[in-house]
Amino acid sequence: MQKKVFQLLVDNNAGVLSRISGLFSRRGYNIESITAGVTADARYSRITIVTSGDAEVLEQIEKQVSKLIDVRDIRELKPENSVYRELCLIKVKSTPEKRQGVIAVADIFRAKIIDVNVDSLIVELTGNQSKIEAFIGLLQDYEILEIARTGIAGLGRGTEDIVYL
């Protein structure tokens, strides 16, 4: 099984995300994460999909997605030529005695404490998936109450592969 990150440039129309995810569902393809947002030009949205499968399945995914009517461009974001980031919010149970330990771990990862309550705090961390996984691993000594992750957003490095519509 291989993992690939695809970046799609699509028309910013109602239902486009549903049509793309429906294609994955109908064909039995797996979506590991999906993010979407409007680009600098409000007529278009950028969708980043992380998916996995063997080489043949990944090739079929790319071909099938490119045939969808709202899709203007699809490309693979290769790790060596791209920047990936993910946002993660983690709520940790934290008594006043243990709070300083959570804050110390957060400081190491340049995470932000964005909410403090009597018995918990919420930490915000942005980074690649391995950084987030490492951070969560170090918090295992504390009670993690909730985690919310955005999924990968990514862009290719440089200006060679920019699509102008």
Image (cartoon, rainbow, N blue to C red):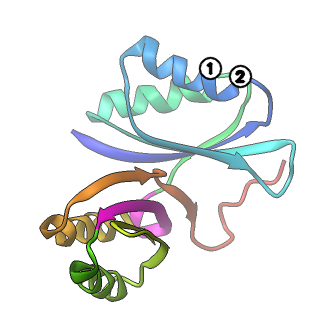
Characterize the magenta stretch by its predominant secondary structure. Answer: strand
Which numbered circle lies on residue 125? none
75 in magenta: no
> Which residue is the extreme one toward the left?
141
Q: Quadrant of residue 122?
A: bottom left
* Mark linked to residue 15: 2
User: Can residue 67 be seen in this snapshot?
Assistant: no
Q: Residue at x 52, y 18 (%)?
A: 23
Q: Nearer the viewer, residue 95 or 43?
A: 95
Mark 2, other Cα within 10 Å: few <14 / some 14–19 / many ≥20 = few
Give left or right: position of 79 versus 13: left
The answer to whether 68 appears left or right of 56 in the picture is right
Q: Amino acid at mark 2?
A: Gly
The x and y percentages for residue 8 are 62, 42
Identity of the residue drawn at 86% across and 47% down: 42
Q: Residue at x 87, y 42 (%)?
A: 43
164 w.r.t. 129: above or below? above
Q: Which residue is mark 1?
A: 19
Q: Compared with residue 122, is residue 11 higher up or lower down, i.e. above or below? A: above
